[in-house]
Amino acid sequence: MALKKNQQSLKKWTRQKWGYTGKKGKSRYLPKAVRDSLTPAQKAAGSRAKNKATKAGKQSARYTKSERRALRRLR
């Protein structure tokens, strides 16, 4: 039986090697391909945006422009 489109997407998502760009819990959680494509400065900017949103009481933070671009290339 063939997988539905959303099941295929979930299967692809789980195959990616996910991890933190820096310290666990203090930085972005991204797929390996995206982590490898970002510069250290871009990773730091993403972590700063995440920490700023966390301190403001938000559960999630918007990706930076460079992170959005890298994620789009991955898809």
Image (cartoon, rainbow, N blue to C red):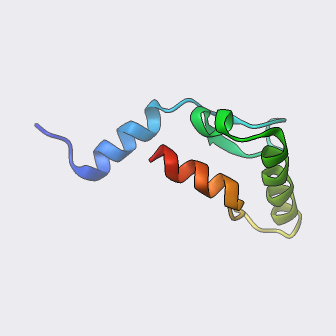
Residue 57: x %, y % from top left: 82, 68
Residue at left offset 58%, top offset 34%: 33
Q: Is 5 situated above or below 63?
A: above
Residue 50: x %, y % from top left: 79, 57
Looking at this view, is 10 or 36 the one in front? 36
Residue 53: x %, y % from top left: 81, 65
Image quadrant assignment for residue 31? top right
Q: Is 1 situated above or below 59?
A: above
2 left or right of 67 in image: left
39 left or right of 48 in image: left
- Could you tell me which quadrant the N terminus lies in? top left
Residue at left offset 87%, top offset 63%: 52
Image quadrant assignment for residue 55? bottom right
Residue at left offset 56%, top offset 50%: 71
Residue 41: x %, y % from top left: 84, 45
Residue at left offset 73%, top offset 46%: 28
Looking at this view, is 36 or 48 the one in front? 36
- In the picture as drawn, the residue positioned furthest to the left comes out as 1
The count of marks equals 0
